Amino acid sequence: MSAKTLSAGWTSIGDAQLVLNSDQQVVIDCGDMQVQLTPFANDMVRVRVVPTSQKSERGSWAIAKEQWDLPPHKYSEDAKGITIELADFSIRVTKSPLRIAFLTPAGEVINQDDPAKGMGWDGAQLRVWKEMPQNELYYGFGEKTGMLERRGLAMTDWNYDIPAYTPATDPIYQSIPFFLGMRDGKFYGIFFDNTFRTSFDMGKESDRYYSFGSDGGSINYYFFYGPSPKKVIERFTELTGRMNLPPKWSLGYQQCRWSYYPEAKVRDIAGNFRSRKIPCDVIYLDIDYMDGFRCFTWNKENFPNPKKMVSDLANDGFKFVTIIDPGIKNDTTYWVYKEGAKGNHFVRNGDSSLFIGPVWPGNCAFPDFANTKARTWWGTLYADLVKVGIRGFWNDMNEPSVFDVPTKTFPLDAVHNVDGEKESHAEIHNVYGMQMARGTYEGLRRLKPDERPFVLTRAGYAGTQRYSAAWTGDNVSSWEHMAMAMPMCMNFGLSGQPFVGPDIGGFIGAPSGELYTRWLQYGVFLPLCRSHSVTGSINKEPWAFGEEFTKINKKFIELRYQFMPFLYTEFYKSSTTGVPIMRPLMLEFPDDKTTYRLDTQFMVGGDLLVSPVLEAGSTSRRMYLPKGEWYDFWTREKISGGKWIEAPAPLDRLPLFVRAGAVIPMQQVVQYTDQAPADPLTFEIFPSAEANGSCYEDDGISFGYKKGIFRATAVKVSVSREATTIKMIAARGSYLPSKRSVVFALNGVEQKPKVINVGSEQLKEVGSLSDAAQGWSYDRELHRLSIKLPDSQTGLDLSVQ
Ligand code: MIG
């Protein structure tokens, strides 16, 4: 019957024949297939369809949380169907033909199977068709080129090394089969946890339905109901895991190039940063630091004494990150190859011979990262680099990428040994990079148990944020790519991976000074702030484009460091909620339709709005200010939103706005994150009737914060006609920053105040705050009142009249 509505070769799921309800789940037999509905939480249910004959189930690579306190559900059945009620939504299953619908408690459809198509199979292929309402929009899908909103597009998930991708290229390096659906500001999410080649057709084939499916495995998806988008992301990342708080230095400015060598060149780059006083924390070593591209070796000619180089530059605040690829040179005299072969850690062909493929070092064998023993072995290989003082690791080429074959990867029938079970590369391909990053991360945890690892990966799958940050691969030095990096990173963030960024300035090609500056100008507000460039290209360091640009580039890198307390606080929050650091405006303003397709601006956290300049020769930027009151960061002028404005944007200005009601912690310029503690720690207050904000601090490197060794400082401000009160609440956590001052900078103060009290003590006006231990001063031009005091763990109470 319903099979007829699917195209040739496809078999539709049959009717429900037998239903079994238990505390854990509802199991519906449909002949050959069995549908299992498992509510994991009040707003999340798993839908899995397996052959009735299938006994065992594959574990999931994505899932971080296996044990859930399953919520109680109310079950009822009638002749037509089954209803499962949860606190937040209900599931209605129609028996003939079997169709699944998700409903609000009021009975409105949130999402439902396409009535004609439902779910079906064709050989190993499987697919789910969903009704597509006219006004529904789609976001997420991991790392995708093109626009933020994805309606009308078809996408494939198959990790793929594709340099100089374009807005039309699909797929690229990462696969995160998760998306958000939205109607009238109400959100749901679907995570299709299937590691085979998957595809999503979000209305390209028909404007009546959308669909997702795969070349293998089983139908296995999680449905999340919001209605708030943040709630969906929180639940999705509770399931698939959240970013671990990275070392603070990895939030600093990072300089990369293919490649900085020999040692003298590296020292020259480092020296340039320091002598020009352009802040920088990280220098990368790309493939040329190695001996013939053999991983875990050094080219002794170019780097005769890496330990000395690294420690000399460490004294100057630099941290090194080195690249490590998966390809291990097929060279029986090379220790890594020998160990790998001896331990049987490499991927094999279908006929069980060793799989060998060419990459940078020539013919290579490839570790089987899907195997626990191989992953553990892989982790030990980093010991020497860690001893040399290398602080972070960059896992590239892990789609996996192979030269000289049309598919650019392993044969689909290559064999992975998943701890005793043989699985084809077709099934493992999309998690290979993730498992490489995992091996790296877990290895570093064992090598340095007290230090947070920093890993950067190119390939990944859902959940990779547990192990690694990500960058968007080989982009191009063009205005188009500069603009596209925004939606790419935002969709990445919506898909659970918050620690992302593009190669600032563009990897391939030669940016003009203007393009580089405009890119860096907003790049300093991206979670990962790294400039990188292809081999043979022009120089792309911040000073490479002439004095006019150098000055501006320096100013904006300094601005990132001034915002460091705020950025670090946002990273901390993201590590606890999964909500991304870099956000599309619709995440903050889901009721404002103008934000739904807006991908030329973004928020950092909930309060900072960044509007990059995206065209050559611009001196202003037309941009949208959502409803509410805003402050221009530069002039401190208050502006009402809910409208488009033309923001001034000469070359040295990035349109930057702060939501009224925010308190943003900031600090002085330093040349690298751990050069000096924030002193003073400045709370920039942008009041409406109230203002609230917080600052999270810890030692920036250890796991002590998990035992309470952090300091969380909340500031609450309330404004009335008589007085403005500022409360710094007693600090939470046991971390004690060194002795320092705090400054409360109250913006939007129209007149010089008369009296400022701290507790019952009156504070004096001073000429210059920087020379005084305490006091206040008023800036008439910026309408900004600054109050300086010694810091206090127990809190402070101020009133301004
Ligand atoms: O085949 O290591 O995306 O960032 O500089 C190219 C050399 C290999 C690709 C990475 C790029 C890196 C480059 N790599």
Image: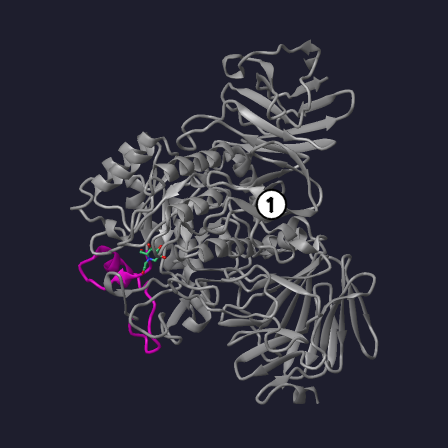
Q: Is residue 276 above or below residue 171?
A: above
Q: In the rendered image of this protein, does residue 474 appear above or below residue 611?
A: below
**Kind of residue at badge 1:** Glu
Residue drawn at 62 percent across, 75 percent down: 128
Binning the other alpha carbons within 10 Å of mark 1 as few (below 14), some (14 to 19) or many (20 upward) gives few
Location of mark 1 (residue): 646
**Colour theme:** one colour
**Residue stretch rendered in magenta on the structure:** 325-354
Q: Is residue 108 left or right of residue 129?
A: right
Q: Is residue 69 visible?
A: no
* Magenta highlight: main SS: loop
Total labels: the figure holds 1
Report whether the residue tagged 1 is closer than 8 Å to ligand 1.
no
**Res. 774 image quadrant:** top right
| Residue furthest to the left | 301
> Magenta segment: does it hold 342?
yes
Left or right, residue 601 beside residue 246: right
Q: Quadrant of residue 741?
A: top right
Q: Report x, y in % for residue 547.
A: 34, 36
The quadrant in which residue 684 appears is top right
User: In terms of secondary structure, where does tag 1 sit?
Assistant: strand
Verify whether residue 668 appears in magenta.
no
- Figure quadrant of the C terminus: top right
Instruction: Classify the position of the N terminus by image quarter.
Output: bottom right
Front in this rendered view, residue 380 or 495 = 495
